[in-house]
Amino acid sequence: MYELIQVSERSYYIQSPAKIGLVKLNDTDVCLIDSGNDKEAGRKIRQILDANGWHLTAIYNTHSNADHIGGNKYLQGQTKCKIYVPGIDCDFTRHPILEPSFLYGGYPCKDLRHKFLLAKESDAEYLGEDVLPDGFEMIQLPGHFFDMVGFRTPDDVVYLADCLSSRETLDKYQIGFIYDVAAYLKTLEMVKSLTAKIFIPAHAEATTDIRELAEYNMNKVHEISEKIVDICAEPICFEHVLQRLFMEYDLTMNFEQYALIGSTVRSYLAWLKDAGVLDVEFDNRMLLWRKK
């Protein structure tokens, strides 16, 4: 873990629970794409920087999930690097309590206020094309989270953040976190058309061809949506929809999974309602979902 892997003349990734990109800007200066999930990840990254005599100039966060910004505060304190984050995700990075609050739908109890959902705040600035290193391209990847982006480097390496998961992850956990299902599917359709020297997804192996994995992720979304529609054959409340999905996929319920998968299922329900597949009714002071 935290092995530095070179994939082109200037581009690398650090093997970690969420892959961290590292790109050489010149002989001494480098930038990071994300920073890992906590202070310890930051320390491991700092060791790699020191061992190679590299100076960290900036961290470009793809989005604000805690496992991608957790090393920001430590690294910024150690190196005085700039931190850039896109759109709404910049506000989540400045005020990380927003992530567990958003997932839970209210003030999160202690069970949700831990490093996997609540990073340390960092002094982030808004990411735009004007602050990118020369030759970098920003790729819009909405769907998984609010304003998530990826990057193409000058030597044609594409970092894809969390826009798709590995087959192994999907087969084990089944329901991956999604904020906007319609945008997520549109992003995957776009990703299928991309070409690059190599693709680096945060939660899948590096590959030269991303199409098959993107299609697998899309198929899983459609599979889950069909199950939800079947569950809603008769009017049913959200909690029972969630319970049925956990039973269907033999998932373990805890506070973290309730928040993450619960938020995702609400996004599926909203998408299916907007598409005219589901509707709601209010009965005995309960909101019930039902197939149209």
Image (spheres, rainbow, N blue to C red):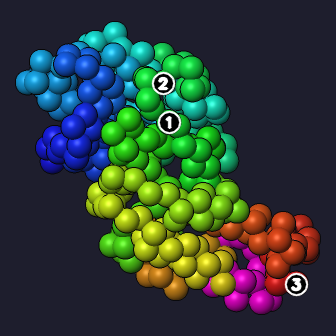
Say if the magenta span includes residue 236: yes
Calculate the distance from the C-alpha at mark 3 to the C-alpha at mark 1.
43 Å
Q: Does 68 sit left or right of 227 as displayed?
A: left
The secondary structure type at the circle numbered 3 is loop
The residue that mark 3 highlights is 292
Q: Is residue 251 above or below residue 230?
A: above
The secondary structure type at the circle numbered 2 is loop
Quadrant location of the C terminus?
bottom right
Amino acid tagged 3: Lys
- Residue extent of the magenta highlight: 227-239
| Percent x, y of residue 23 | 29, 32
Q: Is residue 120 above or below residue 2?
A: above
Task: Tell me the number on the disc at residue 137.
Answer: 1
Q: Does 72 sit left or right of 41 as displayed?
A: right
Residue situated in front as seen by the camera: 75 or 112:
75
The residue that mark 2 highlights is 132
Amino acid tagged 1: Glu
The secondary structure type at the circle numbered 1 is strand
The reply to whether the C-beta atoms of the residues labelled 1 and 2 are less than 8 Å apart is yes
Q: Is residue 39 visible?
A: no
Circle 1 residues within 10 Å: few <14, some 14–19, many ≥20: some
| Percent x, y of residue 217 | 50, 71
Circle 2 residues within 10 Å: few <14, some 14–19, many ≥20: some
Amino acid tagged 2: Leu
Calculate the distance from the C-alpha at mark 2 to the C-alpha at mark 3.
47 Å
Calculate the distance from the C-alpha at mark 1 to the C-alpha at mark 2.
8 Å
Q: Is residue 287 above or below residue 245?
A: above
| Percent x, y of residue 145 | 58, 48
Q: Residue at x 57, y 32 (%)?
A: 86
Residue situated in front as seen by the camera: 267 or 130:
130
Quarter where residue 276 is shown: bottom right
